[in-house]
Image (cartoon, rainbow, N blue to C red):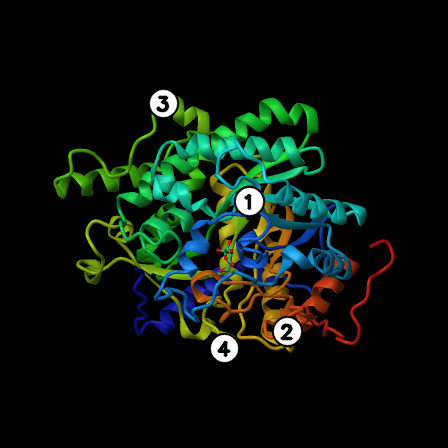
């Protein structure tokens, strides 16, 4: 597990902070978004749908994990009902219209569509649910952006090893084929997989997400290889078979925090942190040469040899596989929430389990208490980190087209979410700075349209523009102040840093 530490170097950090805030020099109070820029919000199936065993849906790894006794979830909650979007999708679309969204990103529950996980049986009720949702959105010109896999693997496949079993490449591609055949005529934006790092490291290494394995330095790397190949196979299938017919886009979403050197001696350490934490997945797809970043291959091979392993714990790709994965994403799908400082010093020795992902990375990461705004320390507020990350992506990967698929702020609830308002304003401002510098960013997605099941943290952390009342059987959704801010940004297509949201009535503007 990550161990957080903060040293008494606040002064030093402030100097670095000032240096990194290059973006602020350009600050204006009202700024425009580029023509054609798209705005949306996002959710994921397990986090909002509920209906966990309804109409033929079978168990997935999150049903399984949340039903364990004792429960590993902070408040012992489950997603059995969650925000009940399985029944309330019309209200969800109404909220999208209230906000004036261009698109809505949601994910498909694999076992709702394929109860055995395989395409031998298609669950008509599951298909109907997604058809209803998609058609309701299209009625109001809201573009569906659909994630095929946002963490809810069929439990049966987990029992066979999940993402550590190479057969997953075919299982996943077979599921994708059914999905493209069924919804491909209407969906033009496909995201293959949400956040490989969280699936592999947190799921198979740190035991903090389903399936909850604690086998870091081995299982997380096996997962990474199969996941990248499954993604690439599905990309090629869409590209060759469905794109000519439907003309859509297909891409992957990576999570990336920003890792900033704590001082000028830590540039290499921070660079290693960025490589391990997200370039592990970005480099094979977006770099000119493909494959894992050389520094990762070298470090893990060297440590593995020292530790007495016969071969590197990071399973290699063949040259054919390197080529097969390279270039398999139309956009760089990016989820970003916060920033860490990085140092590498003597105290890193013995700090992590051996072997493990963190021991291989060999750095210490930490955040500053000053970055906390509001009650939660889940999403520490560091807008300049977002700017630095976007700059790095532009520089490292030949300015790819970036689709921001998640960004958002956690609170502990309540409608007056002024801290979330601040977060959105200044993260969007940092994004506009990157655009001014030439970053090719085409879309922004707020996580989330409404409160939902926040994985291991249950319902204790709230990310919604709309609050969900979990005590009401209707799961009543009420707009927060940030919903009014987002609506105004979308209406005017500008960002006014002075704007104070007027929270009177949330209605639907003409055209939506
Ligand atoms: C995930 C979401 C999650 C959010 C906030 C992302 O890692 O894709 O499912 O709710 O972060 O933790």
- Pointer 4 and pointer 2: residues touching (CB < 8 Å)? no
Q: Residues within 10 Å of mark 2 (few under 14, many from 20)?
A: few
Q: Which residue is mark 4?
A: 375
Q: Name the secondary structure under disc 4.
A: loop
Which mark, residue 472?
A: 2
Depth order, front residue of 321/146: 146
Rendering coords of residue 67 (x, y %) = 42, 60
Specify whether residue 35 is in view: no
- Find residue 71 and report its horizontal and vertical position in percent: 38, 65
Position of 154 with respect to 345 (left or right) is right
Separation (CA) of disc 1 from disc 2: 35 Å
Q: Quadrant of the C terminus?
A: bottom right
- SS for callout 1: strand
Q: Which residue is mark 1?
A: 333
Dot 3 corresponds to which residue? Answer: 319
Element type at mark 2: loop
| Residues at marks 1 and 2 touching, judged by CB atoms closer than 8 Å | no
Looking at marks 4 and 1 on the same chain, the residue that comes earlier in the sequence is marked by 1
Is the distance from the Cβ of mark 2 to the nearest ligand 1 atom less than 8 Å?
A: no
Residue 90, x across and y down, in percent: 73, 56
Between 10 and 283, the one nearer to me in the picture: 283
Q: Residue at x 41, y 48 (%)?
A: 199
Q: Is residue 241 above or below residue 227?
A: above
């Amino acid at each position: 597990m990550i161990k957080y530490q903060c040293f008494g170097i606040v002064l030093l950090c402030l100097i670095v902070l000032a240096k990194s805030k290059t973006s602020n020099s350009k600050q204006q109070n009202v700024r425009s978004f580029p023509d054609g820029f798209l705005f949306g919000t996002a959710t994921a199936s397990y986090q909002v749908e509920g209906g966990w065993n309804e109409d033929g849906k079978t168990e997935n790894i999150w049903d399984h994990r949340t039903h364990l006794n004792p429960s590993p979830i902070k408040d012992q909650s489950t997603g059995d009902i969650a925000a009940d979007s399985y029944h309330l999708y019309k209200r969800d679309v109404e909220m999208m219209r209230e906000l004036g969204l261009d698109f809505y990103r949601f994910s498909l529950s694999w076992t709702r569509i394929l109860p055995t996980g395989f395409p031998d049986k298609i669950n008509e009720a599951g298909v109907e649910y997604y058809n209803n949702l998609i058609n309701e959105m299209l009625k109001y010109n809201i573009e569906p952006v659909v994630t095929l896999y946002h963490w809810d693997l069929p439990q049966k496949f987990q029992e066979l090893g999940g993402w550590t079993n190479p057969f997953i490449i075919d299982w996943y591609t077979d599921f994708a084929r059914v999905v493209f055949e069924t919804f491909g005529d209407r969906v033009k934006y496909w995201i293959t997989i949400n956040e490989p790092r969280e699936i592999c490291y947190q799921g198979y290494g740190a035991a903090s997400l389903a399936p909850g394995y604690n086998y870091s330095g081995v299982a997380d790397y096996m997962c990474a290889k199969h996941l990248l190949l499954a993604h690439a196979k599905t990309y090629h299938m869409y590209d060759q078979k469905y794109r000519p017919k439907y003309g859509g886009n297909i891409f992957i979403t990576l999570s990336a925090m920003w890792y900033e050197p704590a001082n000028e001696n830590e540039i290499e350490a921070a660079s290693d942190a960025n490589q391990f934490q997200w370039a592990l997945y970005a480099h094979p797809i977006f770099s000119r040469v493909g494959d894992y970043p050389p520094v990762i291959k070298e470090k893990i091979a060297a440590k593995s040899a020292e530790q007495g392993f016969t071969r590197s714990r990071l399973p290699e790709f063949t040259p054919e596989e390197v080529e097969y994965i390279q270039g398999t994403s139309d956009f760089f799908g990016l989820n970003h929430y916060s920033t860490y400082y990085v140092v590498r010093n003597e105290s890193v020795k013995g700090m992590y389990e051996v072997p493990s992902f963190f021991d291989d990375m060999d750095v210490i990461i930490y955040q500053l208490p000053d970055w906390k705004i509001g009650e939660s320390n889940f999403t520490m507020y560091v807008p300049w980190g977002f700017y630095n990350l976007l700059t790095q992506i532009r520089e490292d990967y030949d300015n790819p087209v970036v689709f921001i698929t998640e960004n958002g702020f956690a609170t502990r609830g309540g409608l007056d979410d002024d801290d979330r308002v601040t977060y959105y304003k200044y993260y969007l401002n940092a994004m506009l700075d990157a655009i001014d510098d030439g970053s090719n960013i085409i879309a922004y997605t707020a996580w989330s349209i409404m409160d939902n099941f926040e994985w291991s943290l249950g319902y204790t952390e709230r990310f919604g523009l709309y609050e969900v009342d979990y005590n009401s059987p209707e799961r009543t959704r009420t707009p927060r102040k940030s919903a009014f801010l987002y609506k105004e940004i979308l209406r005017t297509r500008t960002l006014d840093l002075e704007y104070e949201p007027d929270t009177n009535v949330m209605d639907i503007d003409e055209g939506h």
